Each structure stands twice: as C-alpha cells, then as structure tokens.
Image: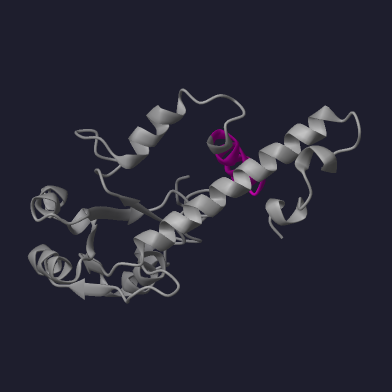
Amino acid sequence: MSPADQLETDPIQAAAPGDAQAAAANVAALDVAALDAEALERHRAETERPTHAVGFTLWKRRTARAFLRGGDGPPVRFHADLEAAIDAAKRDGGRVAAWSARAPEDALARCRAAGIEGALVEDGFLRSVGLGQDLRLPASLIIDRTGVHYDPSGPSDLERAISAAAGLGAEDPLRLRAARFVDAATDAGLTKYAGERGASA
C-alpha cells in the first residue's frame, strides 16, 4: 500500500493532537507519493508512442522492451542502424532509443535534425546481481535525451537534474524522494553489481 493510500484522511488530522513532527512527516509522505505518481504518469505518456531501438545486442532486447514499452503501449521495434530507426520514427510519430556505446557520436543531433525525439540508453547505477559480461540482465537503465552521464564533453539529463536539485530546500518532495531511495539502498547494502566478487561498487 502506498503512503497516499495509508493517509486517506487529511494529513494534519491523521497525526496525534499536538504532534507537529508526525503531521509534517505525513505531509512529506503525501508529497513524495504524488511525485512518484507523476513520474509513473510521465513514463506512461512517453511510452504511448512507438519506440524504435538501435544498437541493442540480442540478449539485452528483453530488458529494453520492459523499460521502453508501457503496459499498453506499442511494441518496441529494433533496427539494424540509426537511419532505419529514424525513418521508422518519422513514419509513425515514434521516438528513437540508441544504446550509447554502439550509437554514432552524433545520434541525438541526427534525431533532432529529423524532428524526432532521441535518447541514449545505458546501464543504470544499480545494474544487476552479477556482471554484464556474464550475460546478467540489467535491473535498471538510464534513458537520457541530452547526452550520456559518463561523457564529460557535454551535458546530460542527469547532470542537469543534479544542478537543478542543488537549489531545492530540505523539505522539497524531490529531495525527500531521493533521500528515501538513498537510505533504502544504503540499508540494503546495494552496489552496482550487488556485491558480486571482483566487481566494483
């Protein structure tokens, strides 16, 4: 059950009389739940359109479908090269998702020039239990419309989000959501490869 479901009454009334700290925590929980719902709705809106993927190896395509397709969205189509993906996206109003390590350096620029949305895809920071070289499927992906986070020569969505968050107050819902995730990951002892021997965090 989500925090919002647990707090069906007014959050201030849900707290014990005079317990201002509990009331504030309830309000924060509702704000964070609303932010999670907003992110889910944004993902649904983005995956309503067809996705044309390029550069994904065969064994990664199952994961790509799970991340790039919404619950009721159109299927993800895989293409042999970027131009084929761009042409298909122009025909059906879709978007292009390219695996960053296998994409041309100007992939996003070419998508913009064609008037379609493009994104680079890379393994997430909490990747898997075990190494990718052992064909362990990723549990998270980064989908970036600006660049890729490990390339210092240009900006990325992640870099911009971190810069924007620097000015947020301590009780801002976005900062609270991030803190909640950091606490959960730290408490669980999570690393990029879940503690696999020989793997770095």
Q: Tell me which residue sits at (47%, 60%) in the image.
A: 128
Q: Residue at x 29, y 40 (%)?
A: 150
Quadrant housing the N terminus: bottom right
Give residue 176's quadrant in the image: top right
- Residue 48 x, y percent position in the rendering: 35, 67
Q: Is residue 197 magenta?
A: no
Estimate the x, y position of residue 90 in percent, counting from the top left: 13, 66
Q: Position of residue 75 (x, y in %)?
A: 32, 77
Residue in the picture at 24% in, 39% down: 151
| Total numbered labels | 0
Give the camera-side residue of 192 and 45.
45
Q: Nearer the viewer, residue 149 or 31?
A: 31
Magenta stretch in the rendered image:
175-188
**Does residue 186 appear anywhere in the picture?**
no
Which of the two residues, 189 or 85, is positioned nearer the viewer here?
85
Q: Is residue 179 visible?
A: yes
- Vertical relation: 84 (above or below) 8: below
Say which quarter of the image contains residue 42.
bottom left
Q: What is the quadrant of residue 141 in the picture?
A: bottom left
